[in-house]
Amino acid sequence: MGRRSLWESARMSVRSIAGSPVRAGLTALGVMIGVASVISLVALGRGAEQEVSKNLQQLGSNLLMIYSGEPRGTALVRTNTANIRPTLTPTDLEAIRSFDSELLNYAAPASTSNAQVQFENRNAAVTVFGTTPEYTEIRNFRPAFGTFFTHADVESRTHVVAIGMQVYRDLFTPGTDPVGRAIRVNGVSFTVVGVMEEKGEAAQDNSVLIPISSYQRRISGDSAFQMIAVQATSPDVMRQLQSQIEEHLLRLHRMPTMDSADFYVVNQLDLLSTVEGVAGTFTLMLASIAAISLVVGGIGIMNIMLVSVTERTREIGIRMALGARRQDITIQFLAEAVLIAIAGGLIGIALGVAGSWAVYRFARIPSEITILSVGTAFGFSVLIGLFFGGYPAWRASRLNPIEALRYE
């Protein structure tokens, strides 16, 4: 088929669509909805994946968490530590800190429990953390104003405390400088040395941090730790560092294998991999559900094109009588179906992008539109036009010219 014939088929297709704009618009509606749904739902899925990954990164980079006890799911922070018997010892901590500096930046012990804090006539339920100064570097959790306690405070068991931002709001009037004020933690007086930056996470914003030595003396009465937080030098060495930690602690605890160990290690890389896998599956599921509406839109195109073939039977007969070949008729009706699908796809892209922006703008739900999702949705809409427009086009080309001319 020559270029002139192709141009003529395309021109006739456009003229036919323009002659019934309402019908063409309704035919393309399914494709519009399908493309818009695929783009917006994939954007929401990608946004959720990025948000969770960002939140994990905020907990600290290159992070390994060594927990006392047996595994209880893949969580960097246990929400309930009341029944956990501490099994990690100062000897374990020193062994970890002695690792090669090419593998490890920091290691800090931590023990937690629920507590009641009070300032004057205000009180709040919080999580109290006993730890050391390295914890701020490992968990990327630093004072917004004031300072954090020092190694000297840990060694001397000083009663000092750094409070989370939510604790500050609960205990103090806005604008009040809490540094130097005394609050009571489970009835024991501690002097506030700083207020931690806001993280947007209850486990950190609603916490108070005190020297691990003060925690062991005043809160737990136990010299062991519930957990040890470790920061690797880079993501590349995290697996190696985890393996060495497990080997050393198994030897110190006189345990044969990790299956019988009284501790376990959570690797941030594993959590990120799990999150990405779950989020990817969730996004694929959303896209698959949205793609169903694209198929429905394709069925609508086929239905309308079959009706169009019936309505234009006499026109097809006249064209064939004037010398049009079956191939010309096929191309004309196939082009008409594809043009409807392309128009629906383009409008659907605009609707999907606008919908994703509106969800983020008004509902504050993160979304991320990618070129891949837009291209895939649009390409699928074109394929829908080709596939579902193929049969009506083939049927039109198979009409008997004589019978078509007689059709009323």
Image (cartoon, rainbow, N blue to C red):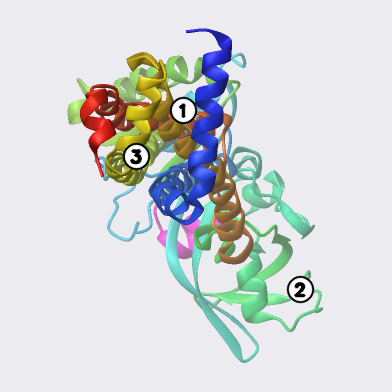
Give me the disc on residue 169: none
Depth order, front residue of 155/125: 125
- CB-based contact (under 8 Å), mark 3 and mark 2: no
Cα–Cα span, label 3 and label 2: 83 Å
* Amino acid type assigned to the residue bearing label 1 in the image: Gly
| Residue that mark 3 sits on | 312
How far across and how far down the image is residue 213, in percent?
A: 54, 52
| Residue that mark 1 sits on | 379
* Amino acid type assigned to the residue bearing label 2 in the image: Pro
Residue drawn at 71 percent across, 68 percent down = 192
Which SS type dominates the magenta stretch? helix
Q: Nearer the viewer, mark 1 or mark 2?
A: 1
Sequence-earlier tag: 1 or 2: 2
Q: Residues within 10 Å of mark 1 (few under 14, many from 20)?
A: some
Depth order, front residue of 247/311: 311
Q: In the rendered structure, which segment of residues is drawn in magenta? A: 212-222
